[in-house]
Image: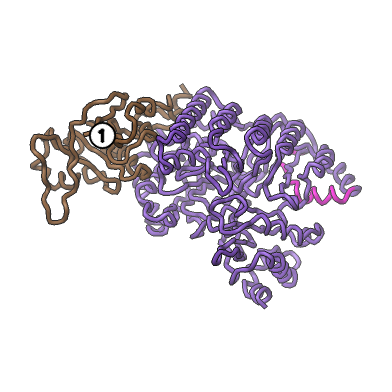
Chain colours: A brown, B purple
């Protein structure tokens, strides 16, 4: 499995295996002895069974509604959001909702078509790990995470939009 | 006018460094074309029919003389010595080299300019009335709000990959709407509520293009301090639910229509309820801080120069005509608003040479406190000219090519670059404008016709705003041949209306005749005081149809 970028630019080994959605008629096949991410709605359906299991997290697709997890977000060790195309910007709103609306505090990961030039936006929206597309140069991630030293807006990373910082 | 502080300067410099890095990776083959595409678009760079095109942002149309001179230098050093004022108050260069663009952006940043978000599926330049701050009937100056929106929307981390482009316009005048806010994704009309508090009437879901729509009101009154949180709520609903499967159905207008305006408003209100008291809520102090950049210049205490102007007008008929058409009333006694028309026959509408840019800068320094405004009608405004210097100013305009006294007349044509430059165009637009200008070269006849908006677009993307022209012309492609469809009755102000298609399209050579016939019907049918639009609204489209297709 490809390595994972952390928000501080460091690179670590990936521990989590993404289980894709089972085809119609098939059942969810969870590999043993692995930490896995399963589709969020399937986790909710079987919450009794999965909650509290530190080896089972979830992933949301860009058209999924983070509202399905709502009050249960902090029962999860990791939530991943899939970017099917890097130009599909729904994942940014999903991340902010998970963090700011539902108060999710654990690891939030960007997966899928994750490229370098979007990393800083992801970081600002609350993602703290990133699974870069394998053909991209992971050594360039630290720079891409820090193209800008500040932003104009409040987002998940700061409560202080520039207009409030200027005032002080 | 707004002046950068250390934060703005730092982010502008970081943006240039970022794009330099991205361009190097693109040229080194590390970024696929489709990966580089949104990055270069959000830095203003298109790849066009003949060469790249760079769209430079002019925030809400304001430019200082030092910026005009820098633009002139850039067109000389990196381009072919001319630039084009667009229909969204921006400036375009038609011939830059891809590898030079980071250097051009660095040169722009030195004078507090940029090309951020002038293209791509993001929040674009916020536009407003070119007479903001100098007209007497506005509730307050709209420009500080435009600047507040500019800062909020710049590099917004959540809204850089929207389903489609997103345009906001602000208007503060009760009588006029020179910003055409009702054909924007969000149109903000500054209003006062019954308690006398300042706020915004929020229109969402207007637009031109393939499916033209006038924006419905989704909130009658939004308190001033809630501006950014409410915009954030609208954008979040759009980002989440706007269509991404079909580019032609991806604008917010389609979502508003699908949900109905009331249904859409409900979703926005629900989202807003969560964030309205978040730290993004504006403060009085933050607004006042920006307003302080838009204070009045050092006007002299003057009386209106009524007698002097009367004498000068009597002695010089051409000056009289220019004064009547290209000069507007200023809120300060003794001052006037002057529009320089970039619509001289033989020059594509909105085009200026490097030398002309410098001449405009000189005029701004000499006559108008060093500032100009760019209009979406592709003209340039000197907003603060002393009335007793109007004649002296006017005498210089003719030789410079800005003196054509045709503002708001039939030949003050709004026109996109069209098939001569644009890769999207179905047909050329500049030659059509030129042929119409040549046909109607008699100023007295134009004045007699009064105000008529003639707008030309080379394709359905409608950069020439043809849907809202009183007369609209749209270039269409029929089996590889260029044809032109005509619509009538469009309007862009408070009475915003999408024009009606007259009938089958015409060949380019027939266009001057077609326009002449339409004008003919108006002249025959009008009553004394009626404008073209009034007559059209009274008599309907049929008399025009009968005459044109007879």
Q: Is residue B193 visible?
A: no
Q: Is residue A12 left or right of residue B217?
A: left
Location of the C terminus of chain B (image quadrant): bottom right
Q: Is residue B133 visible?
A: yes
Q: Residue furthest right?
A: B315
- Residue A128: % across, % down: 28, 30
Corner quadrant of residue A158 = top left
Q: Residue at left 26%, top 44%?
A: A66
Location of the N terminus of chain B (image quadrant): top right
Q: Is residue B73 part of the magenta span, yes or no?
A: no
Q: Is residue B325 part of the magenta span, yes or no?
A: yes
- From this view, report whether residue A46 is shown above or below residue B512: above
Question: Which is nearer the eye, A27 or B385?
Answer: A27
Q: Is residue B170 left or right of residue B308?
A: left
Q: Residue at left 47%, top 47%?
A: B165
Q: Chain of mark 1?
A: A
Question: Which is nearer the eye, B195 or B164?
Answer: B164
Q: Residue at left 87%, top 43%?
A: B307
- Residue A107: % across, % down: 23, 31
Question: Which is nearer the eye, A140 or B388?
Answer: A140
Question: Which is nearer the eye, B212 or B81?
Answer: B81
Q: Which residue is mark 1?
A: A108
- Residue B463: % across, % down: 57, 52
Q: Which residues are magenta?
A: B316-333
Report the number of numbered marks.
1
Q: Is residue B137 left or right of residue A157?
A: right
Crowding at dot 1, Cα within 10 Å, few <14 / some 14-19 / many 20+, comes out as: many
- Is label 1 in a helix, a strand or a loop? strand
């Amino acid at each position: 499995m490809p390595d994972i970028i952390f928000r501080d630019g460091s690179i670590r080994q990936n521990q989590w295996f993404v289980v894709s959605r089972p085809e119609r008629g098939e059942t969810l096949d969870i590999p043993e002895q692995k930490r896995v991410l399963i589709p969020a709605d399937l986790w909710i359906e079987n919450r009794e069974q999965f909650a509290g299991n530190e080896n089972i997290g979830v992933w949301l697709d860009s058209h999924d509604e983070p509202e399905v997890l709502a009050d249960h977000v902090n029962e999860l060790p990791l939530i991943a959001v899939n970017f099917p195309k890097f130009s599909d910007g729904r994942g940014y709103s999903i991340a902010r909702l998970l963090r700011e609306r539902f108060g999710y505090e654990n690891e939030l990961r960007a997966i899928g078509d994750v490229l370098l030039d979007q990393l800083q936006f992801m970081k600002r929206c609350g993602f703290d790990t990133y699974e870069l597309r394998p053909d991209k140069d992971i050594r360039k991630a630290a720079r891409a995470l820090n193209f800008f030293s500040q932003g104009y807006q409040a987002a998940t990373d700061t409560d202080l939009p520039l207009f409030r910082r200027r005032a002080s | 006018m707004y002046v950068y502080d250390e934060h703005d300067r730092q982010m502008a410099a970081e943006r240039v460094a970022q794009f330099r890095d991205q361009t190097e990776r693109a040229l080194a083959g590390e970024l696929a074309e489709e990966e580089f595409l949104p990055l270069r678009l959000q830095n203003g760079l298109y790849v066009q029919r003949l060469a790249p095109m760079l769209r430079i942002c002019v925030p809400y149309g304001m430019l200082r003389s030092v910026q005009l001179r820098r633009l002139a230098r850039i067109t000389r050093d990196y381009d072919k010595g001319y630039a084009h004022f667009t229909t969204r108050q921006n400036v375009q260069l038609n011939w830059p080299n891809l590898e030079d663009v980071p250097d051009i952006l660095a040169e722009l940043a030195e004078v507090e300019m940029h090309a951020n978000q002038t293209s791509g599926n993001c929040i674009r330049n916020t536009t407003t009335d070119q007479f903001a701050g100098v007209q007497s009937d506005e509730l307050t100056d709209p420009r500080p709000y435009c600047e507040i929106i500019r800062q909020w929307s710049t590099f917004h981390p959540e809204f850089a990959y929207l389903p489609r482009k997103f345009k906001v316009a602000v208007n503060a005048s009760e009588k006029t709407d020179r910003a055409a806010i009702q054909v924007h994704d969000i149109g903000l009309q500054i209003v006062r509520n019954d308690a006398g508090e300042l706020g915004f009437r929020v229109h969402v879901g207007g637009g031109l293009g393939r499916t033209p729509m006038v924006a419905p009101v989704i909130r009658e009154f939004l308190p001033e301090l809630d501006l950014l949180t409410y915009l954030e709520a609208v954008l979040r609903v759009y980002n989440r639910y706007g269509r991404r499967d079909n580019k032609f159905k991806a604008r917010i207008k389609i979502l508003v229509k699908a949900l109905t305006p009331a249904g859409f408003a409900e979703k926005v209100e629900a989202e807003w309820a969560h964030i309205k008291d978040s730290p993004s809520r504006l403060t009085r102090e933050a607004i006042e801080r920006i307003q302080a950049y838009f204070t009045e210049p050092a006007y002299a205490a003057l009386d209106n120069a009524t007698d002097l102007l009367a004498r000068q007008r009597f002695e010089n008929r051409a000056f009289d005509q220019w004064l009547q058409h290209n000069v507007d009333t200023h809120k300060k006694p003794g001052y006037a608003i002057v529009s320089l028309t970039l619509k001289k026959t033989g020059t594509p509408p909105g085009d200026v040479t490097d030398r002309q840019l410098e001449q405009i800068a000189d005029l701004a320094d000499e006559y108008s406190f060093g500032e100009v405004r760019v209009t979406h009608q592709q003209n340039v405004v000197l907003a603060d000219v002393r009335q007793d210097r109007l004649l002296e100013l006017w005498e210089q305009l003719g030789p410079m090519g800005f003196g054509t006294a045709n503002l708001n007349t039939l030949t003050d044509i709004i026109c996109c670059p069209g098939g001569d430059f644009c890769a999207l165009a179905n047909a050329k637009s500049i030659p059509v404008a030129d042929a119409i200008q040549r046909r109607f070269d008699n100023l007295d006849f134009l004045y007699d016709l009064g105000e008529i908006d003639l707008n030309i677009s080379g394709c359905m993307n409608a950069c020439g705003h043809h849907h809202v022209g009183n007369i609209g012309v749209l270039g269409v492609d029929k089996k590889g041949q260029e044809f032109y469809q005509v619509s009538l009755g469009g309007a862009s102000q408070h009475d915003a209306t999408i024009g009606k298609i007259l009938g089958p399209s015409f060949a380019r050579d027939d266009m001057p005749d077609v326009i002449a016939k339409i004008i003919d019907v108006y002249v025959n049918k009008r009553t004394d005081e009626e404008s073209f639009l009034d007559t059209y609204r009274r008599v309907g489209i049929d008399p025009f149809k009968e005459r044109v297709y007879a």
